[in-house]
């Protein structure tokens, strides 16, 4: 597959999103596209699959060819046999009601004879491990299962190229690893070409053959093996919003950094003598929100939990374990069915004191433009400017929130909650879909607020964040509280049971000390 | 169906589904009004039941939009359980045809407020004629029937035409319609 | 069960036909009997959650009864006011009562028939059958299917937006503006999702042409014709009855 100096500009934007991007995809290659949020990755992926220019409101130059044949000249429907896409948003890529119908849909489109279909549907479901859910309704699937189903639909059609746009953004760590393991085995099995868009590249390191780095200006500035790329650009990558592998980050922080940088924990450990230190100050204040024996619908039954004042509490756990539900109950968005829940402020002006950031950013938006969103939260003009600057949306201030990129939406939805200085802040996966830079800026801001005395409750799948910022952790499992305590204690628990992975620092330390691990 | 884009069809059916729910929600309101004013009660708010035609046609601007959307809405309403049952399908189709006819008369070219109100009124006319035979307004006093007719006309023009346009324009402002006829028109205006 | 396996298109057309036929008649007895027959058939040959059926039937009955009152109350001058019947506390012309009763049972008959369909038909199979038997364009059929998926989402979306309002704190603004803040995000969200869904469908090779195979082939078998035949027969029987005990009359648009 060949992409020849591709440029693209949306109608209602003054600068092009992509500027003569040129690269090629070889057979059974796994290529990783890195780039800041909003740099045009999803846009690029849409060009590969021939959605653009067909669906584009704007202008596109350059040429995308598949085996020498221009994509946009391909007759409708044929492209889908060559390039399969798993889109960024798993909610909206299904059109049927049940799992089997959904997978079959693709096959029907390419006129697979009815009698052959059953077989192919089942093999596809088998491969992604969803066979037991064959008859299930699509809505009933959890976030992770939806991702797998989306993949199954593509696999069934057996295209030589698969494009995945942030396929693991909402998956828990173990599910992510499983997903990637699945991909790499399929890659060997069917020798397919895989094109992945991701922000957090750590779990992908093993299966990537090549990385592309997309700059904020929308042009590729690197195309080649990961190692060299990191070695050459390590310092600029942060500015470009590209996450360097955890090992490299650590290496640079500890100052033992000279190219070639280590890419994995093992590599890093080799170069280290002393174990990496945990952040200090993980003591918690008196109880602020107290829940005893609360139940909600069929999802929860008598859960006890305490959020202590001035704490930075992380909520982690597998997909579908009830994190969102719990936080919504604590924040008083959904009423508890039974049990006692005590909050420090009266209900009527509760939301003057508490802020909540929904898991789906689009749920936060009520107005017609980025500017209005912030104004609606009661920010003054200069405050708005400041926030826009902070979430890098200054030039988008008149856009409707819905037209932003996934990550941009995320930042805006968080920003709307940072306007007022609430005493308590709930955030449901605030960093998913974020590039390295905006993540760290977001976390710094939260840390700042936390120092200033705000109590923060944050749901996340990112154990490194937990390790670096949280003063307390609540781990959900099967819609119950599986663990409460501080992170350092958690790392000694059986993490796999919680579908979690130990953070990078801990993994490294373990490798340094051989296999027995002593918490500092 | 040939010159329809898939996304236009999906959006149309989504609109229909949403408004099918709205339609159902307004039935009791009508019931209450009839309780007070008699059969004319429905006519005050009758325009509501045309609104999806106007919105769909105004946004998508393809022949059939008004008719199909109203028909789908009616079908969904029946599936959700509307006491009128299968008869509602027919009423829905006829209302849709009414709205459609207005746009057909303008050759599917003009989509200003006037046209939309006119379309709402045509829907009212069609549905009234149908009602005249089907639910037998014949049995009512002539003056009363005339009053009902006028009320429904106005209701159609205001609740379907004006309100429908207002809502669609509000939607267009959000930019989610950039891929549809209405959104494109707005952008042209913006550029100019 | 027979009704559940019945070809959806055949089922739908039969019911539509019966409804239209029934709409032409006007007497209290025929629709009443037909209602009973329909319910009987539904319960005998249908497989569904009985509880829910009653759930639906009750409001319909209330609706019908309500109709009874309004029609009596707003009936125009009767031809022969002399004949009256005593309802609980007031005297009303016999004729008006008959009209009212007939109308109410009509409604019930219609209602029960659509219930028969709703409770024994799978939406997807219905659409598939519409495509395979009645040549409905796939583009339209699958477009509708995709739209139909939004139905269950609507309530959650609505609750979600209400929650957002609470969290963000309602601004001091006019009522109209506040409704708008509900309606617009709801619709805007729905449209965005719809658009994405459409793109996803096309990227799975959906072009909307008729050249496509089907995972589930819906056919019309011989036994499918039993339903229209049977229901038709019953209907004729009822008409014969009405003629025999001459209460038969055409519908002249009573209200
Ligand atoms: N349909 C559209 N119309 C107008 N502008 C758009 C559209 N889609 C995306 N954009 C803009 O183009 C830019 C690139 O969007 P894109 O979704 O490709 O970013 P991305 O790299 O995928 O970001 P993320 O990592 O957050 O998903 C964004 O600034 C976004 O605001
Ligand atoms: N309103 C609801 N009614 C019934 N079940 C629900 C409802 N909301 C969520 N669930 C179910 O409850 C479980 C917990 O959902 P929740 O969204 O809290 O999980 P989560 O931990 O946030 O998952 P993720 O990490 O994917 O966000 C899921 O299995 C979900 O299907
Ligand atoms: Mg993206
Ligand atoms: Mg969640």
Image (cartoon, coloured by chain):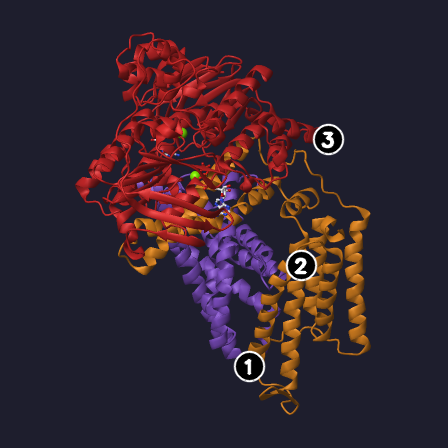
Mark 1 vs mark 2: in front: 2
Residue A415 location, x and y as percent? 28, 39
Neighbor class of circle 1 (other Cα within 10 Å; few <14, some 14-19, many 20+) is some
Mark 3 vs mark 1: in front: 3
Neighbor class of circle 2 (other Cα within 10 Å; few <14, some 14-19, many 20+) is few
Marks 1/2: CA distance? 35 Å
User: Of A346 and B82, which appears nearest the observer?
Assistant: A346
User: Does label 1 or label 2 sit earlier along the sequence?
Assistant: 2
In the rendered view, does B33 fall on the left or right side of A387? right
- Determine which of the numbered discs, if any, sits on residue B63 in the image: none
Q: Residue at x 60, y 62 (%)?
A: C55
Residue linked to disc 1: C73
In the rendered view, does A315 fall on the left or right side of A93? left
Residue linked to disc 3: A115
Chain at tag 2: C
Mark 3 on the same chain as mark 1: no
Chain at tag 3: A
Residue linked to disc 2: C50
Tag 2–tag 3 contact (CB < 8 Å):
no
Q: Is mark 3 within 8 Å of ligand 2?
A: no
Secondary-structure class at tag 3: helix
Image height of C252 relative to A278, above or below:
below
């Amino acid at each position: 597959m060949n992409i020849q100096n591709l440029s693209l500009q949306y109608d209602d934007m003054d600068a092009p999103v992509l500027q003569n991007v040129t690269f090629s995809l070889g057979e059974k290659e796994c290529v990783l596209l890195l780039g800041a949020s909003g740099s045009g990755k999803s846009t690029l992926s849409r060009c590969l699959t021939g959605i653009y220019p067909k669906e584009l409101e704007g202008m596109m130059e350059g040429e995308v060819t598949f085996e020498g044949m221009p994509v946009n000249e391909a007759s409708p429907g044929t492209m889908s046999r060559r390039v399969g896409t798993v889109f960024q948003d798993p909610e909206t890529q299904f059109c049927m009601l049940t799992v089997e119908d959904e997978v079959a849909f693709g096959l029907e489109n390419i006129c697979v004879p009815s009698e052959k279909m059953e077989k192919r549907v089942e093999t596809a479901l088998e491969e992604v491990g969803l066979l037991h859910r064959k008859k299930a309704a699509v809505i009933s699937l959890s976030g992770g299962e939806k991702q797998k189903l989306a993949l199954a639909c593509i696999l069934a059609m057996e295209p030589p190229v698969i494009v995945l746009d942030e396929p693991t953004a909402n998956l828990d760590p173990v599910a992510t690893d499983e997903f990637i393991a699945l991909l790499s085995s399929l890659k060997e099995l069917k020798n397919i070409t895989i094109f992945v868009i991701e922000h957090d590249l750590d779990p992908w390191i093993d299966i990537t053959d090549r990385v592309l780095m997309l700059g904020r200006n929308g042009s590729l500035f690197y195309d080649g093996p990961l190692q060299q790329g990191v070695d050459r650009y390590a310092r600029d990558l942060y500015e470009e919003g590209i996450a360097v592998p955890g090992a490299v980050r650590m290496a640079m922080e500890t100052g033992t950094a000279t190219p070639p940088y280590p890419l994995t924990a093992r590599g890093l450990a080799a170069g280290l003598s002393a174990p990496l230190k945990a952040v200090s100050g993980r003591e918690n204040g008196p109880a602020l929100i107290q829940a005893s024996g609360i139940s909600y619908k069929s999802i929860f039954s008598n859960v006890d939990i305490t959020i202590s004042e001035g704490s930075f509490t992380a909520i982690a756990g597998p997909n579908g374990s009830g994190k969102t539900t719990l936080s919504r109950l604590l924040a008083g968005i959904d009423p508890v069915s039974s049990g006692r829940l005590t909050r420090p402020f009266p209900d009527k002006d509760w939301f003057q004191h508490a802020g909540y950031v929904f898991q789906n950013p689009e749920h936060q938006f009520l107005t017609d433009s980025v500017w209005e969103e912030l104004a609606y939260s009661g920010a003054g003009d200069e405050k708005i400017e400041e926030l826009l600057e902070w979430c890098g949306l200054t030039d988008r201030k008149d856009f409707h929130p819905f037209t932003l990129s996934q990550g941009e939406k995320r930042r805006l939805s968080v920003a709307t909650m940072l306007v007022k200085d609430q005493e308590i802040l709930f955030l449901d996966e605030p960093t998913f879909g974020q590039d390295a830079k905006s993540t760290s800026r977001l976390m710094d801001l939260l840390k700042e607020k936390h120092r200033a005395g705000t109590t923060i409750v944050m749901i996340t799948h990112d154990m490194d964040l937990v390790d670096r910022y949280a003063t307390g952790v609540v781990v959900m499992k099967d819609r119950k509280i599986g663990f409460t305590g501080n992170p350092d204690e958690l790392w000694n628990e059986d993490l796999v049971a919680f579908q979690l992975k130990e953070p990078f620092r801990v993994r490294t330390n373990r490798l340094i000390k051989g296999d027995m691990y002593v918490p500092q | 169906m040939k010159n329809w884009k898939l996304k236009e069809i999906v959006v149309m059916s989504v609109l229909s589904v949403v408004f099918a729910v709205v339609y159902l929600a307004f039935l009791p309101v009508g019931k209450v009004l009839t309780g007070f004013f008699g059969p004319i009660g429905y006519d005050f708010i009758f325009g509501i039941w045309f609104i999806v035609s106007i919105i769909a046609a105004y946004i998508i601007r393809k022949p059939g939009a008004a008719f199909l959307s109203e028909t789908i809405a009616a079908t969904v309403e029946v599936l959700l359980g509307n006491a009128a049952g299968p008869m509602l399908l027919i009423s829905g189709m006829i209302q849709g045809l009414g709205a459609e006819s207005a746009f057909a008369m303008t050759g599917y070219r003009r989509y200003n407020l006037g046209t939309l109100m006119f379309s709402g009124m045509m829907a009212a006319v069609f549905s009234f004629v149908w009602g005249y035979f089907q639910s037998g307004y014949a049995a009512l006093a002539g003056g009363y029937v005339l009053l009902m007719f006028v009320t429904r006309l106005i209701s159609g023009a205001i609740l379907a035409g004006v309100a429908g346009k207002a809502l669609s324009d509000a939607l267009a402002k959000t930019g989610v319609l950039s891929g549809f006829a209405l959104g494109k028109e707005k952008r042209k205006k913006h550029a100019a | 069960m027979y009704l559940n396996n019945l070809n959806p298109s055949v089922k739908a057309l039969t019911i539509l036909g019966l409804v239209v036929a029934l709409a032409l008649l006007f007497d209290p007895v025929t629709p009443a009997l037909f209602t009973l027959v329909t319910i009987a058939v539904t319960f005998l040959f249908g497989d569904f959650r009985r509880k829910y059926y009653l759930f639906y039937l009750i409001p319909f009955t209330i609706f019908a009864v309500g109709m009874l009152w309004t029609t009596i109350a707003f009936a125009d001058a009767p031809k022969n006011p002399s004949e009256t019947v005593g309802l609980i506390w007031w005297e009303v012309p016999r004729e008006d009562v008959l009209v009212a009763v007939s109308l109410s049972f009509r409604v019930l008959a219609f209602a029960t028939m659509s219930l028969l369909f709703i409770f024994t038909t799978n939406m997807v199979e219905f659409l598939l059958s519409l495509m395979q038997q009645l040549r409905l364009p796939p583009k339209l059929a699958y477009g509708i299917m995709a739209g139909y998926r939004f139905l269950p989402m609507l309530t959650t979306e609505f609750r979600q937006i209400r929650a957002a309002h609470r969290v963000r704190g309602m601004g001091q603004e006019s009522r109209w503006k506040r409704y708008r803040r509900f309606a617009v995000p709801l619709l805007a969200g729905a449209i965005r999702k719809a658009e994405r869904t459409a793109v996803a469908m096309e990227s799975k090779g959906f072009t909307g042409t008729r050249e496509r195979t089907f995972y589930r082939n819906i056919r019309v078998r011989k036994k499918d014709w039993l339903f229209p035949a049977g229901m038709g027969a019953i209907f004729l029987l009822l008409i014969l009855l009405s003629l025999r005990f001459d209460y038969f009359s055409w519908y002249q648009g009573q209200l």
